[in-house]
Amino acid sequence: MTLDTLIPVAYLIAAVTFILGLKGLTSPTTAVMGNRIAATGMLIAVIATFFASDVRGAVPVILAGVVVGGAAGFYGARVVKMTAMPQMVALFNGAGGGAAALVSILEFSRELDLGALAFGSTLATLLGLVIGAVSFSGSAIAFGKLQGLITPKAFRYAGQQLVTGALVAAIGVLAFVLLAASLGALAVDAMLIVVAITVLALVFGVALVMPIGGADMPVVISLLNAYTGLAVAMAGFTLGNQLLIVAGTLVGASGTILTRLMSKAMNRSLGNVLFGAFGAATATGATTAVARDDGRAIRSISAEDAAILLGYAQNVIVVPGYGLAVAQAQHNVRELADLLESKGINVRYAIHPVAGRMPGHMNVLLAEANVPYDKLFDMEQINPEFPRADVALVIGANDVTNPAARSNPGSPIYGMPILDVDKAQNVIVIKRSMKPGFAGIDNDLYLDPKTAMLFGDAKEAVGKVVQELKRAA
């Protein structure tokens, strides 16, 4: 046995660890182990690649890349705040897609120099290039929206669908020409066409994500993750690397499934997601939402009042949102829950699939504060429990608790499944101000007579409630 024959065996072992790792991620209790198993497999794959005959001569360059990339990744992962985790995921998606696109371009250039263009390899190159470039530029726009560098509102303009359609058509025509050239049917400047396709794909990625509003970013992130996986799989076909094919296919398939689940949670069809035809609140919808303000007053309470209401409850449901993440209030919320449970009060957490800015954002935040996994309940599990809850404590969750999604056909979020917070006996909402969420609409929940608003930074507000509860003990 030679080293070259052992490398596929190492790749097979790595592929199995990836599958086991994904399996582990299906449960919070096994997620950490799943990550470690998959990471070990990736380490095996990277080490094995160094021994490949076509790589040995470039080891110094690869090592330099590993050092630079590893240092940047390690530093970024250590210093990133949990509120910025969606942005980091967007950057990772973009880096993966961009790398796949570059690999496709370089491999195509090499085959062109050798005069060895073939239909199959050209097709794989085109798919990896287009999908990777779309993922790269789309992820850059998603990062900008999440970071606040670009307005998170949906960007619409006259003739938008026509422009997007023209970009797709142009990419398709150029791809057809390049495929025809690979069969010897046309004589063209193949590299010039590849450059043109790259530019068009990058522009298409921007055009795809810009029309999507910030409230829909969780769906976009999972979709771009699927794009990156598919691009990596195509790069694997281009390079003839089995592991890239397996890993990319796993990421693409899991990302697609997650996109489907997230779009369902947002009441969007997968077709809407794929073609970017969602995320903008119509003018009519926004007008209708404002017009439904019937003059009901907002009721504000103090931390002392909130502590009294919570202290006399038997069942409390905590609804975390992005405001909790911004304030880094998860540890204070855990302290509040522990204090309530010491009084015999049942405390549970309601997790909406798209709460926060990425899939699982709230789960990760609460896990950081060591909130027990069995206290976290999905929307389908917890919604029937709200009518039996004495208090629903909402911390920074806007759109996912808005009853307009059920009652107002003119609302931009009408039809979106929400947490049935308004069915609780009492509702306490902790917010900095009355500023609307990412969907840009007012929340009818705040006008409900059962709702009391505790204004302020979530971390400070929860801390004051904890102090009042301790003082009353």
Image (spheres, rainbow, N blue to C red):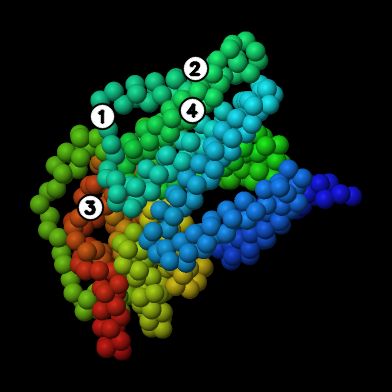
Amino acid marked by disc 1: Tyr
Residue 411 visible: yes
- The reply to whether the C-beta atoms of the residues labelled 1 and 4 are less than 8 Å apart is no
Q: Give the x, y percent position of residue 119.
A: 66, 21
Q: Along the polypeptide, which appears first: circle 3 or circle 4? A: 4
Q: Can you tell which mark lies on residue 195?
A: 4
- Disc number lying in front (3 or 2): 2
The residue depicted at 73 percent of the width and 49 percent of the height is 56
Find the distance from the CA under tag 1 to the CA under tag 3: 24 Å
Viewer-nearest residue: 124 or 12: 124
The residue depicted at 42 percent of the width and 40 percent of the height is 138
Q: Secondary structure at mark 4?
A: helix
Find the distance from the CA under tag 2 to the CA under tag 1: 25 Å
Q: Report the quarter where the C terminus lies.
A: bottom left
Q: Which residue is mark 1?
A: 157
- Disc number lying in front (1 or 4): 4
Q: Can you tell which mark lies on residue 436?
A: 3
**Residue density around tag 2, few if under 14, some if 14–19, many if 20 or more, within 10 Å:** few
- The reply to whether the C-beta atoms of the residues labelled 2 and 4 are less than 8 Å apart is no
Amino acid marked by disc 2: Val
Q: Secondary structure at mark 1?
A: loop
Q: Which residue is mark 2?
A: 173
Q: Along the polypeptide, which appears first: circle 2 or circle 1? A: 1
